[in-house]
C-alpha cells in the first residue's frame, strides 16, 4: 500500500497493491498492521454500505459529538468524494478537497474525525463501503449545505443533484456547529 498526501495534511489517499489477471483481481483493503506502519493506527467499530443512482448527492455529514473517522472506498461505479475540515483550531478550517473514487482506481480515502464528508454518485449503481471509528449517533449528526457559496465546492454536476430532505436543509458553514 502507498499513502498519498493531500493538500489538507490529515486527509490521506491510500493506493492498495492490486494483483490482477484475466480471472479478475485481488487486493487487501484493510490490514491493521499495514495501516499502522503507514501512520494510520485505526480501530473501527462499524461498517457501512451505500448504493446510489447517478446524480445522488449525500452529505456533507459529520457528528458534532462522537465524531467518526471514515475509511471510504467505492466498489462499484464511481463517486466524487468531498472532505471539509471543520476544526476551528486548524489552519485548514473551512477548506475542502475532492477526490474521484472508483471501482477502477480502487483508491481508499481516510477522512479523519473532525471533518465533514459527502459524495456525488457519478454513475448508476455506485456503491461505497466505509469503515467508521465511532458508532452512528443520529442525535449528534449534522449536515452542511452542499452548495454553500462560502465553501465553493466544485461538484462535477451535469444536472441538479438528487438530495434527501435532510441534506437539502443543511446549514451553511457560517451557521453550523463545528469542532474546536
Image (tube, grey):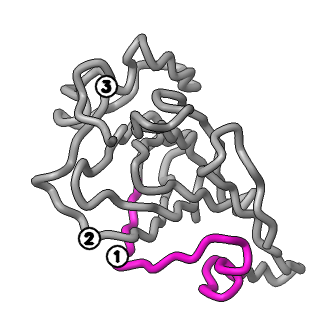
Of residues 77 and 36, the one nearer the viewer is: 36
User: How many numbered callouts?
Assistant: 3
Q: Name the residue under label 2.
A: 135
Q: Distance between the residues labelled 3 and 2?
A: 23 Å
The crowd level at tag 1 (other Cα within 10 Å; few <14, some 14-19, many 20+) is some
Q: Determine the image quadrant of residue 132.
A: bottom left
Q: Mark 3 points at which residue?
A: 145
Quadrant occupied by the N terminus: bottom right
Q: Name the residue under label 1.
A: 46
On the question of residue 85 being in view, the answer is yes
How far across and how far down the image is residue 27, in percent? 73, 80
Q: Residue furthest left?
A: 139
The image's mark for residue 158 is none
Q: What stretch is highlighted in magenta?
A: 28-51
Do tag 2 and tag 1 residues touch (Cβ < 8 Å)? yes
Quadrant occupied by the C terminus: top left
Q: Which of marks 2 and 1 is nearer the N terminus?
A: 1
Amino acid at each position: 500500500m502507498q499513502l498519498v498526501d493531500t493538500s489538507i495534511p490529515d486527509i490521506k489517499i491510500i493506493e492498495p497493491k492490486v494483483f490482477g489477471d484475466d480471472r479478475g483481481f485481488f487486493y487487501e483493503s484493510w490490514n491493521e498492521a499495514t495501516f499502522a506502519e503507514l501512520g494510520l493506527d485505526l480501530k473501527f467499530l462499524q461498517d457501512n454500505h451505500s448504493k446510489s443512482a447517478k446524480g445522488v448527492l449525500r452529505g456533507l455529514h459529520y457528528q458534532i459529538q462522537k465524531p467518526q473517522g471514515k475509511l471510504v472506498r467505492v466498489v462499484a461505479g464511481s463517486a466524487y468524494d468531498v472532505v471539509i475540515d471543520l476544526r476551528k483550531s486548524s489552519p485548514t478550517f473551512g477548506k475542502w478537497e475532492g477526490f474521484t473514487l472508483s471501482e477502477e482506481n480502487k483508491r481508499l480515502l481516510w477522512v479523519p474525525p473532525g471533518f465533514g464528508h459527502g459524495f456525488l454518485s457519478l454513475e448508476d449503481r455506485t456503491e461505497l463501503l466505509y469503515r467508521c471509528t465511532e458508532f452512528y449517533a443520529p442525535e449528534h449528526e449534522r449536515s452542511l449545505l452542499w452548495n454553500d457559496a462560502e465553501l465553493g465546492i466544485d461538484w462535477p454536476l451535469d444536472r441538479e443533484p438528487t438530495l434527501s430532505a435532510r441534506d437539502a436543509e443543511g446549514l451553511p458553514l457560517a451557521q453550523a456547529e463545528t469542532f474546536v
